[in-house]
Image (cartoon, coloured by chain):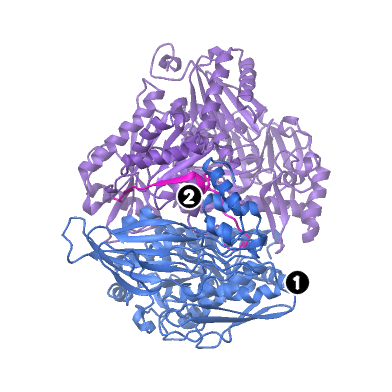
Chain colours: A purple, B blue
């Protein structure tokens, strides 16, 4: 760790100016690179190299360095996010992993919630657990909900068990005991014996990876961590070596699912924290744009080729959650994947992207996605053998995309193929004209994204009409205007370089770590001393992690408790001030809870005891200060680059629309819809009557007419 | 102006999202574990005539038809002239609601620009409604708890305080029940707001146009599916334990050109204990079973349910009339699909599964400090309800699901969460090897549970189990699943149903049933037999006896599993 590398020459607290930083995002199709120097960005997009992902990074880095005219040795810091962890879980490419657990609970990860996530499918199958039953070993031990040892763990029994684990050729071991989040002594004992008898095996303890109540989630999380640990360790050390061989001299940090940055060592120890780090970077990017523009409530909308991700961002902070689901096996259906309980940026992901395919079902309803054409064969218009219509085909027919200028002109689109596919698979079946069929496909996908956003907002007690949408990802600007209209959102922002939003987000993320503990405490039985100790321990853990990344910066702690009425199942997070956290007191906590509960659900429930379920401290370095943008009103009309017919989804009519090249727009210039603002990677559709203004920070700011 | 086809397509999706939002709001604010952890709830949207247009897919197929019918009862009982803006209606009538007093249904009329345009409704299973508590022991519905006839919970926004006082005075957990009532009201309010927004957006004055579009398309799609079936009739039956007299469910199916008739003629009469089933609940599970097999992806609404005509003679256990005790109506209700499939399999071979565990393996504990035990600071009382599942029946092409509910869709509660709710220790909750019926496809495994109290506590154990004497039958040569067993750890026998005392220091040992197998065991792929042996789903004895695996093969599998080879 060389702290000086990201301090400027004057040694002031302005941490990041003057240094050259590289953001690297490995996605499913592309690896995106952003090199930033003095606020100037140099972009590179190269195909992801699955066999050795570090190859694409090295290629992309050289491309970006070339554009910037620097050597890799001049890079001061690299921040990396990747889908590799997620993909390893989805594709089941992890290590041979064992789970050691409490006797009587061998099958927790297999029995799941004992329910079917799709109720009407008689042939439903549930996902297989990451460790098959013969790889799950039990030992006699038991801790109570209060942390008392009911059955002590015998060392001899651990040794015998570990000898069986060793005989099975296990590379990585997960340990998960009942109630270990309150008392981890038995898990720690297993690690000690493992260190003696299987020194080469990697070990993950549930009390460290995810110290939270609910055994299924915790065991699954520790198992997922153990499962990808050897793979991610090997990748990260190869990456370090390759970059070093290419002359890189700086530290490499990793983006984590919670939207912060951790050291390479921490990432190697807790690789499960890298899951969904790319989309988390996108949310951080949106939060940064929100900060720059001074917007309090933002819905980030990230639509790519296969999926769309939606996240709520309040006060420039993405909403976080303590559990989420990866590797959904059944049309992205809730419950069909595996739960991972770690701090994450809370978002919904649905199978709706440019490549999502349309069909007509038995009720003559049009369905779009989650099946996707991907890049091979792609939607029909790619002319690579895809015969079924995708969302991109509908967009093309509706006039939203210029066939000669798609993805920077790299793929020539063929409208005739789109028309044929839409007619064959949608229009003929429903006796619809071509335009109407295309419009239906587009409307169905927009509606399903809007529905996902609405349900997500309700789950979080939010009213979307007060929100601003920030849209990025290749397909988002084509659909964002309409989706915003459906949600009653009046303002839409498309930031510059939207197609590499996640990688830019990495460069905006603070060093951060959130430490959580599940300790139940009723306010009627409140133990202020214990509360104080808990917060102190958590703060020590969290700041300790951050300190390993950054030896000098100020570290800010944020304190939260999750509270609910005793008897409820869902907690709400209550943000506490430093004073409230350092001097806990039941009356204040109750008041804070009732305030927030009333805001979310209308009224408090009188006469019920309130309890704390989770204690949480998030430590982070300060977020880089943003330069506020002074918004410009609409001035001159932007210069037209041409006109084309675009179908307006609200009326269903073909409109004569203006087109403007984004690169020619100056701050204050505006376009009134119907219109299209075109750029290399994507096109922003300006709905009828809406006004799009170019702002000084390069954002296109659209006042959406509902 | 009549909205376009495009608008109708969008609105249908929107209504389905309205009810999903409704359900979500209920889970977020509910108190009963049955609602918030297990998902035992439902929500729906209706037109002004009371026809259900969309329903949230939640944990409970049993609510499907019951919810579809309920709103019509509310309209009739309240009277159209007395329906005002700001009203909220309530009932827990087992016959006009969803089958037992523990389900509260609330209905809210939706007014748009001062005109009644539709209704929102929701139902949730609450943990206590007074009376004897949740169990099988009552002899009439009067003993099962407080009865709330269809009435106004609120009129023009004003909550009926008299009703709340009566409720508070009659239940064990008054705060939580009142909290749940408000959660139900909130749920409808969320739905109403979203419905109103949609009507504004599409400039609708009423729901007639969209209702017609939804109902016509759903009816047509359902009828098309039925028309494609062979016009046949078939009968089937299944016998289960009952309380102390075995119960036979008899079903006759007739496939017509545009509808399916289900007749329960020949089914056992009403039982003297609380396992009887109001017709609406049995009908729901009959429809659910048929929809899964015939038209799984058609959403539930008035029209898609209509072509399934279900009849049962009054006084049978599937059409129990007032004042029969009905608290555990789920036991019989959950067996209805297996009974329907015993007939449907003869008409549509190769589609339906073998019999499974059927009813959920639920129990409730009332824990308290033992009089004789030394007093400790940790002594406390507690009411603990858990939902658990046995194995599902093997399918024609797939094994049954291990410890997974069918036909119910509710979730189990985490052991760690349960142990926080009272002085209970769950010592074991894991799969039960050798319990899945042998077959070409194996039945799903049941599970073991061992339940005790923390030191110094005793408890009453409310058992709600079946399939002790009537295990799940296999199909087409498949073997039956293992039966339920229940006893104390000192060997004292226990009954499958009813309240039983367990003293300090003793545990309840439970083994939940497996699903039946499908097809001849000798036809099972040997690779799957070996996999099952390696995983310990079956023992070496079963591998040899039921599947004919040789001694050498068994030894080889065990050796390979020890070495960590993949199966």
Say what secondary structure mark 2 lies in: helix
Dominant secondary structure (helix, strand or loop) of the stretch shown in magenta: loop
Disc number for residue A417: none
Which chain's residue wears label 1? B
The crowd level at tag 1 (other Cα within 10 Å; few <14, some 14-19, many 20+) is few
Residue A140 is covered by the magenta coloring: yes
Residue A316 pos. (x, y %): 45, 37
Per the rendered image, the range of residues in magenta is A118-145
In this orientation, which residue lies closer to the viewer: B151 or B31? B31
The residue lying furthest to the front in this view is B551
Quadrant location of residue B498?
Answer: bottom left
The residue labelled by disc 1 is B228
The residue that appears at 30% across and 73% down in the rendered structure is B171
Quadrant location of residue B301?
Answer: bottom right
Inspect this view and state whether residue A706 appears: no
Residue B399 pos. (x, y %): 60, 59
In this orientation, which residue lies closer to the viewer: B417 or B17? B417
The residue lying furthest to the bottom in this view is B314
The residue that appears at 25% across and 42% down in the rendered structure is A531
Residue A532 is covered by the magenta coloring: no
Inspect this view and state whether residue B213 appears: yes
The crowd level at tag 2 (other Cα within 10 Å; few <14, some 14-19, many 20+) is many
Say what secondary structure mark 1 lies in: loop
Residue A36 pos. (x, y %): 55, 21
Q: Is residue B479 above or below residue A628?
A: below
In this orientation, which residue lies closer to the viewer: B496 or A430? B496
Q: Is residue B134 above or below residue A533?
A: below
Residue A508 pos. (x, y %): 49, 28
Q: Is residue A136 above or below residue B8?
A: above
The residue that appears at 61% across and 30% down in the rendered structure is A497
Disc number for residue A109: 2
């Amino acid at each position: 760790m060389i702290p000086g590398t990201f301090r400027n020459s004057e040694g002031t607290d302005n941490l990041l100016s003057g240094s050259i930083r590289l953001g690297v995002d490995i996605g499913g199709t592309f690896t995106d690179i952003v090199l930033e120097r003095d606020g100037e960005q140099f972009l590179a997009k190269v195909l992801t190299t699955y066999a050795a992902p570090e190859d694409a990074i090295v290629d992309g880095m050289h491309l970006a360095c070339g554009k910037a005219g620097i050597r890799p040795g001049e890079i001061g810091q690299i921040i990396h996010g990747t889908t590799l962890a997620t993909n390893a879980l989805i594709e089941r490419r992890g290590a041979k992993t064992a789970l050691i657990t409490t006797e009587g609970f061998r099958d927790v990860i297999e029995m799941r919630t004992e329910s079917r996530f799709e109720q009407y499918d008689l042939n439903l199958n549930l996902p297989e657990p990451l460790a098959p039953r013969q790889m799950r070993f039990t030992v006699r031990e038991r801790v109570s909900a209060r942390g008392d040892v009911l059955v002590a763990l015998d060392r001899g029994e651990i040794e015998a068990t570990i000898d069986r684990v060793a005989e099975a050729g296990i590379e990585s071991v997960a340990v998960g005991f009942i109630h270990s989040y309150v008392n981890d002594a038995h898990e720690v004992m297993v690690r000690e014996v493992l260190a003696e008898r299987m020194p080469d095996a990697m070990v993950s303890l549930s009390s460290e990876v995810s110290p939270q109540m609910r055994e299924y989630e915790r065991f699954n999380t520790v198992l997922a961590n153990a499962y990808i640990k050897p793979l991610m360790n090997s990748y990260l050390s190869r990456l370090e070596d390759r970059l070093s061989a290419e002359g890189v001299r700086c530290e490499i940090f990793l983006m984590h699912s919670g939207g912060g940055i951790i050291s390479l060592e921490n990432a190697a120890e807790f690789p499960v924290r890298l899951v969904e780090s790319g989309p988390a970077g996108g949310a951080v990017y949106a939060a940064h744009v929100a900060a720059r523009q001074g917007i309090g409530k933002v819905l980030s909308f990230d639509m790519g080729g296969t999926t769309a991700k939606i996240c709520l961002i309040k006060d420039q902070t993405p909403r976080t959650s303590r559990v989420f689901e990866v590797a959904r096996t059944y049309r992205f259906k809730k419950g069909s994947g595996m739960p991972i309980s770690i701090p994450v940026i809370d978002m919904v992901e649905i199978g709706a992207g440019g490549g999502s395919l349309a069909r007509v079902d038995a009720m003559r309803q049009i369905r779009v996605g989650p099946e996707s054409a991907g890049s091979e064969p792609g939607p029909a218009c790619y002319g690579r053998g895809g015969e079924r219509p995708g969302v991109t085909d509908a967009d093309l027919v509706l006039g939203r995309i210029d066939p000669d200028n798609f993805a920077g002109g790299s793929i020539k689109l063929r409208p005739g193929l789109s028309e044929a596919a839409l007619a064959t698979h949608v229009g003929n079946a429903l006796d619809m004209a071509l335009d109407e069929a295309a419009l239906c496909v587009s409307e169905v996908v927009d509606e399903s994204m809007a529905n996902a956003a609405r349900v997500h907002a309700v789950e979080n007690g939010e009213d979307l009409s007060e929100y601003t949408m920030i849209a990025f990802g290749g397909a988002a600007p084509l659909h964002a205007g309409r989706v915003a209209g459906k949600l009653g959102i009046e303002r839409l922002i498309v930031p510059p370089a939207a197609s590499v939003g996640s990688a830019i987000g990495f460069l905006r993320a603070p060093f951060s770590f959130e430490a959580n503990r599940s300790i139940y405490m009723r306010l009627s039985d409140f133990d202020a001393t214990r509360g104080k100790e808990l917060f102190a321990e958590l703060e020590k853990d969290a700041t300790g992690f951050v300190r390993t990344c950054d030896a000098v910066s100020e570290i800010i702690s944020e304190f939260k408790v999750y509270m609910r009425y005793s008897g409820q199942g869902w907690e709400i997070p209550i943000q506490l001030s430093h004073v409230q956290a350092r001097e806990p007191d039941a009356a204040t906590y109750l008041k804070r809870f009732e305030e927030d509960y009333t805001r979310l659900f209308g009224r408090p429930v009188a006469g019920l005891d309130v309890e704390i379920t989770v204690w949480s401290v998030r430590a982070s370095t300060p977020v880089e200060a943003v330069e506020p943008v002074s918004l410009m009103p609409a001035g001159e009309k932007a210069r037209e680059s041409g006109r084309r017919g675009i179908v307006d989804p609200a009326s269903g009519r073909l409109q004569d629309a203006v087109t403007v090249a984004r690169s020619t727009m100056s701050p204050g210039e505006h376009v009134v819809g119907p219109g299209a603002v075109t750029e290399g990677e994507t096109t922003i559709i300006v709905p009828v009557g809406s006004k799009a203004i170019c702002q000084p920070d390069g954002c296109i700011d659209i006042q959406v007419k509902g | 102006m009549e909205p376009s086809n495009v608008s109708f397509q969008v609105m249908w999706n929107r209504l389905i999202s309205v009810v999903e939002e409704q359900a979500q709001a209920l889970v977020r604010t509910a108190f009963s574990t049955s609602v918030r952890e297990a998902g035992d709830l439902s929500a729906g949207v209706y037109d002004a005539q009371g026809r259900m247009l969309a329903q949230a897919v939640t944990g409970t197929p049993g609510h499907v038809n019951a919810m579809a019918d309920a709103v019509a009862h509310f309209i009739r009982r309240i009277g159209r002239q007395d329906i005002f803006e700001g009203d909220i209606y309530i009932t827990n009538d087992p016959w006009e609601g969803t089958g037992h007093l523990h389900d509260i249904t609330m209905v809210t009329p939706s007014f748009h620009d001062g005109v009644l345009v539709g209704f929102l409704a929701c139902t949730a299973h609450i943990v206590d409604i007074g009376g004897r508590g949740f169990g099988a022991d009552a002899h009439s519905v009067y003993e099962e708890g407080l009865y709330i006839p269809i009435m106004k919970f609120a009129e023009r926004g004003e909550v009926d305080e008299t009703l709340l006082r009566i409720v508070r005075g009659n239940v064990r957990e008054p705060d939580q029940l009142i909290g749940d009532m408000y959660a139900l009201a909130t749920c409808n309010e969320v739905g109403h707001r979203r419905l109103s927004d949609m009507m504004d957006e599409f400039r609708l004055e009423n729901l007639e146009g969209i209702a017609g579009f939804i109902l016509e398309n759903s009816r047509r799609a359902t009828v098309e599916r039925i028309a494609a079936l062979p016009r046949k009739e078939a009968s089937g039956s299944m016998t289960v334990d009952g309380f102390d007299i075995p119960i036979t469910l008899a079903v006759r199916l007739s496939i017509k050109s545009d509808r399916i008739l289900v007749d329960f003629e020949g089914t056992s009469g009403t039982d003297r204990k609380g396992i009887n089933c109001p017709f609406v609940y049995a009908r729901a599970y009959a429809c659910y079973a048929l929809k899964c097999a015939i038209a799984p992806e058609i959403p539930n609404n008035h029209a898609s349910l209509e072509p399934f005509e279900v009849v049962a003679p009054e006084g049978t256990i599937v059409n129990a009339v007032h004042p029969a005790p009905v608290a555990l109506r789920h036991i019989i209700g959950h067996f209805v699909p297996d009974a329907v499939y015993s007939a449907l399999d003869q008409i549509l071979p190769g589609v339906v599964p073998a019999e499974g565990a059927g009813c959920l393996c639920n129990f409730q504990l009332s824990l308290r400090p033992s009089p004789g035990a030394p007093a400790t600071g940790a002594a406390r009382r507690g009411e603990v309800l858990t939902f658990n599942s046995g194995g599902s029946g093997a399918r024609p092409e797939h094994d049954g699901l291990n410890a997974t509910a069918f036909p119910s869709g509710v979730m189990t509660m985490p052991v760690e969460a349960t142990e926080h709710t009272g002085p209970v220790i769950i010592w074991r909750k894991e799969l039960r090897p050798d319990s899945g019926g042998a077959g070409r496809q194996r039945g799903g495994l049941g599970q073991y549970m061992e339940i005790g109290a923390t030191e110094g506590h005793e408890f009453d154990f409310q058992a709600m189990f079946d399939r002790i004497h009537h295990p799940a039958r296999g199909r087409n040569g498949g073997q039956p699943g293992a039966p339920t067993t229940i006893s104390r750890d000192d060997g004292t026998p226990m009954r499958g149903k009813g309240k039983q005392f367990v003293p300090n220091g003793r545990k309840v040992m439970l083994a939940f049933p497996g699903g039946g197998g499908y097809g001849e065991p000798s036809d099972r792929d040997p690779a799957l037999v070996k996999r099952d042996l390696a995983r310990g789903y079956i023992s070496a004895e079963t591998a040899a006896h039921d599947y004919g695996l040789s001694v050498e093969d068994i030894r080889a599998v065990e050796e390979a599993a020890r070495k960590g080879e993949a199966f």
